Image (cartoon, helix red, strand yellow):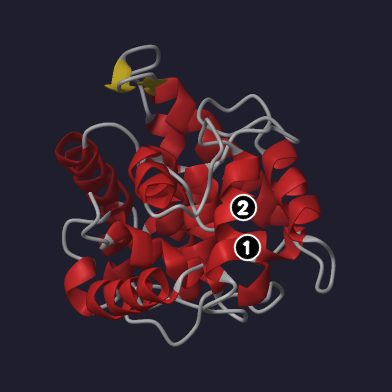
């Protein structure tokens, strides 16, 4: 990485990773809560929904969080089964999602929380991150919007959720998990991050898949070896586009 690009990325990350970032981003929803259990459920649902039109999916998330808050908060909504009263069934929730997809997502969350305190316990300290990611995907197998275990896709929303949960000392991310090191995280790659990384010469790959995410993360580790996912903010805020 040339010095000019490195300097630009450092400045971009410093400019972008701030409290102002929260407004207009799906991370705004878990920021409404003080309890770790509510933060985690809200973050998982918010990350699951975060694709397509930002304006539209933020509106859907506003509605869903209103429902969860009426039941006592996201964690109670899931664990006490308020989702069982959903009657919309096969009606569209958002784009490719139906209300039944939300119901199945909540059902799986409820089952997991009956066995463990947090989704964090699907990850084993010191183990390669991809093994925990595989277990997480297996736990939600068949749920629309959750990647197939072992998928070669970039899994952007899942890695964004992990960034929220793991990175510490950030005004944006929560850092409420400790079984994963920030150094293990991958940069969540979507079309904008991919295009920016290509323009900066950080990847030459022809598609935004998991290998691309790994390659971009390796580049960011040259700047932030203990926290390469900070590169997500750097690329998001880059002026190259």
Q: Give neighbour class at mark 2: few <14, some 14-19, many 20+ (Cα, 10 Å).
A: some
User: What residue is disc 1 on?
Assistant: 218
Q: Position of residue 225 (x, y in %)?
A: 61, 79
Q: Quarter of the image holding residue 93?
A: top left
Q: Is residue 76 visible?
A: no
Instruction: Determine the CA span between mark 2 and mark 1.
Output: 5 Å
The answer to whether 189 is drawn above or below residue 185 in the figure is above
Please give the name of the residue rendered at 58% of the width and 75% of the height, measured from the top-left corner.
222
Q: Is residue 33 visible?
A: yes
Q: Position of residue 187 (x, y in %)?
A: 52, 58
Front position in the image: 217 or 160: 217
Please give the name of the residue rendered at 26% of the width and 53% of the height, measured from the top-left corner.
70
Q: In the image, is 71 to the left or to the right of 54?
A: right
Front position in the image: 126 or 28: 126
Helix, strand or loop for disc 1: helix
Front position in the image: 160 or 8: 8
| Label at residue 152 | none
Helix, strand or loop for disc 2: helix
Is mark 2 in CB contact (under 8 Å) with mark 1? yes
User: What residue is disc 2 on?
Assistant: 215
Count of picture labels: 2
Q: Position of residue 24 (x, y in %)?
A: 17, 56
Q: Give neighbour class at mark 1: few <14, some 14-19, many 20+ (Cα, 10 Å).
A: some
Q: In the image, is 221 to the left or to the right of 126?
A: left
Q: In the image, is 235 to the left or to the right of 213?
A: left
């Amino acid at each position: 990485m040339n010095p000019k690009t490195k300097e630009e990325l450092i400045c971009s990350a410093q400019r972008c990773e701030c409290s102002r970032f929260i407004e207009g981003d799906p991370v705004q929803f878990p920021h409404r809560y003080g309890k770790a259990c509510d933060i985690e459920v809200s973050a998982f649902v918010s990350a699951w929904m975060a694709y397509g039109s930002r304006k539209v999916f933020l509106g859907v998330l506003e509605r869903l969080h209103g429902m969860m808050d009426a039941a006592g908060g996201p964690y109670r909504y899931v664990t006490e089964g308020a989702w069982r009263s959903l009657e919309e069934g096969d009606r569209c929730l958002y784009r490719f999602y139906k209300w039944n997809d939300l119901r199945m997502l909540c059902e799986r969350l409820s089952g997991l929380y009956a066995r463990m305190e947090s989704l964090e316990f699907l990850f084993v300290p010191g183990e390669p991150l991809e093994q925990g990611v595989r277990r997480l995907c297996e736990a939600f197998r068949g749920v629309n919007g959750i990647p197939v275990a072992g998928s070669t896709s970039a899994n952007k929303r899942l890695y964004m959720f992990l960034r929220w949960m793991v990175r510490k000392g950030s005004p944006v991310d929560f850092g409420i998990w400790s079984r994963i090191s920030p150094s293990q995280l991958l940069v969540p790659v979507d079309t904008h991050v991919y295009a920016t990384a290509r323009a900066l010469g950080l990847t030459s790959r022809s598609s935004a898949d998991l290998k691309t995410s790994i390659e971009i993360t390796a580049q960011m580790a040259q700047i932030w070896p203990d926290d390469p996912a900070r590169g997500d903010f750097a690329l998001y805020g880059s002026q190259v586009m």
